[in-house]
Amino acid sequence: MIVIDYKDHRSLYQQIVEKIEELIAQGLLKADEQLPSVRQLAVELAINPNTIQKAYSELEKRGVTYSVKGIGNFVSSDLENVLEKRKQTVLQKLGDITHEVVLLRIDKKEFLNECSKFYEKWKEE
Amino acid sequence: MIVIDYKDHRSLYQQIVEKIEELIAQGLLKADEQLPSVRQLAVELAINPNTIQKAYSELEKRGVTYSVKGIGNFVSSDLENVLEKRKQTVLQKLGDITHEVVLLRIDKKEFLNECSKFYEKWKEE
Amino acid sequence: MIVIDYKDHRSLYQQIVEKIEELIAQGLLKADEQLPSVRQLAVELAINPNTIQKAYSELEKRGVTYSVKGIGNFVSSDLENVLEKRKQTVLQKLGDITHEVVLLRIDKKEFLNECSKFYEKWKEE
Amino acid sequence: MIVIDYKDHRSLYQQIVEKIEELIAQGLLKADEQLPSVRQLAVELAINPNTIQKAYSELEKRGVTYSVKGIGNFVSSDLENVLEKRKQTVLQKLGDITHEVVLLRIDKKEFLNECSKFYEKWKEE
DNA sequence: GTGGTCTAGACCACA
DNA sequence: GTGGTCTAGACCACA
C-alpha cells in the first residue's frame, strides 16, 4: 500500500503523510477506518518508528486523522473537509507552476494543451 | 534585481539559483552577460560570499552559466538549450500536479478552467 | 580505502570524488551500499566535514550516489548507467590525448605500441 | 592563429601556452621565429597583457622559447629537444588515461580499437 | 580585482 | 546518530 522511495527528494515522513492523503483521496481509506499501528507500519516499511510517529502526528495536525489513546489512529470522520483542504493545497501548487509557465513565455494554447494531455494520461491509469 | 525572502522555505542559495534562472527566462539576463561578482552580490544581499559561491557553482553545473577564473561568471551562450531544459523541468512538475488533481477526482473542465484563470492572472503581472 | 595526497594537483574534494568513482568502477563499492558518514570520513581523513560534504554533493549531482536525509549516502542503484557515463568521459579524454599525439606526428604503430604497453603495465597491478 | 575559449576549463594563460606548443609541434612556428609581442597579442586576444606575459614566462621556463631583452620572444633554436619533452608529457598523460581505462575493465581489444579509430580521425583533419 | 577551496564552528531537520 | 546550510575568515591562482 505504501512504498518508500529512498531516492525521492522528500523526507521519509513526508512521503508517508502524502501517500496516506492520496489513499484517502482515492477512497482506498475510508472515514473512521483504522490506520496500521506505528510499530506495525515501522516493521513493514523497515523504518524507524519515530518516523512513522512523526508522520501520524503531522496527519493529525492537518486534521486528516485523529488518534485515540491506547487504541490507534483513525481516518477523520469528516472526509469532505479533508478533501476540500487538500484540494486547496493542490490548487495552490498548480498556481505556482502556472507562474513559472508564464515566466517561460509558454503559449497559453500550448499550456492548456499540455494540461489536457496530462489529465487524460493519468485518468487512464 | 534579486530579493532574498527569509520566510521562504527554500534555502538561500536555492532562491538565488532559481531567481537567476527566472531572470534569464524573462530575458532580463542575456547570453554571455556578466553576473555580479561573488563578493559584490554578497554585499548587496548581506549574505556570506560562500553562499553566493554555492549558488554560482550550482548554476554552472546546470549549464546555465560558465565561470572564467580571475574574470567572473557569465550567462551561458547557449540560452536556447538552457530554456528548453527549464521547460522540461516545469512540464514535469505540471505533470506531477495533474496526477494529484486526477487522484482528487477534480473534473477535467474545472481543472482546465483553473489553469486558464491562473494563466491570465500571472500574465497580467 | 581512500588516501589523500597533498602533493596531488587536484583539490581535496575532487580526489575524494574521483577515488569513490574508481572504487565503484573496480566493484569495491556496490549498488545501494552505504558510504561512510560525512563526519566519520572527515575524522578518518583528518579533513573538514564541509569538504567531505562538498565531495558527496558532487557525487550526487553526477548521479553516482544518492543521499537520504537523516540516514546517509548510498551508491546509486543504477550502476550500469554510472559506469557508462564514466566510460564516455574517459574515452573523451582519450580522444583529446590522441589529437595531441597526432599533432606531434607520432607514428601510428608507435602510438598503438605505447597504448598496449601501458595497458599491460596497469593490468598487472 | 590563437583562439581563446572562455568556456574552456583551463586558465587563459595555460590555453596560450599549450596552443603555442601545438603550433610548434605542427611546424607552424619554426626555430628562432619571433612570437608576437606581448602588447600586440594582448590586443589581438582582448586579454590582459599580464596574462600574455605569464604565458611567455611559462614557455621560457619550459625551454620552449627564449626572450631577448628589448627585442622580443623567440621559438627555441633546439626544436628537437622541445618536441622530445612534449612527447614525454603527452605519453605521461596517455599512461594516466590508460590506467583509468584498465580500472573501468575496458577490454584490451576494444581499447586499442578506440585508439586506432581516434588516430585515424585526427589524422584526416 | 576575480573565482575557488578549505577550515572551524554553529544550527537545523530528520531518523 | 544522519545530511545540509550558513557564517566568518583565511589563502591561493589567475587577470
Image (spheres, coloured by chain):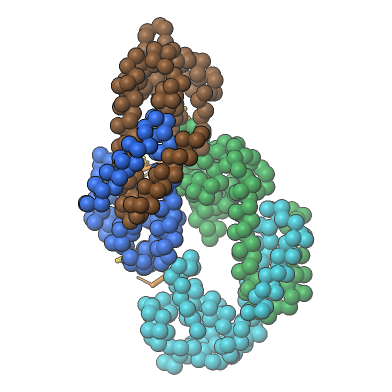
Chain colours: A cyan, B green, C blue, D brown, E orange, F yellow
Residue B93, given in percent of the width and then of the height, sits at 61, 64
- Kindly identify the residue that appears in the image at 32 percent across and 43 percent down: C115
Q: Nearer the viewer, residue A13 or B68?
A: B68
Q: Nearer the viewer, residue D11 or F5?
A: D11
Place residue A22 in its image quadrant.
bottom right
Does residue B101 appear left or right of residue A14 in this picture?
A: right
Place residue A6 in its image quadrant.
bottom left
Does residue C19 appear left or right of residue B111 in this picture?
A: left
In the orientation shown, which residue stands out farthest toward the top? D70
- Kindly identify the residue that appears in the image at 39 percent across and 82 percent down: A42
Q: Quadrant for the N terminus of chain B, please.
A: top right
In the orientation shown, which residue stands out farthest toward the front? C109
Does residue A2 appear left or right of residue C40 in this picture?
A: right
Q: Nearer the viewer, residue B120 or C72?
A: C72
Q: Is residue B53 visible?
A: yes
Residue C33, given in percent of the width and then of the height, sits at 33, 67
**Above or below, D66 relative to C75:** above
Residue D6, given in percent of the width and then of the height, sits at 51, 34
- Kindly identify the residue that appears in the image at 50 percent across and 18 percent down: D41
Residue D59, given in percent of the width and then of the height, sits at 36, 22
Q: Nearer the viewer, residue C73 or A51?
A: C73
Q: Is residue D61 visible?
A: no
- Total of numbered circles in the picture? 0
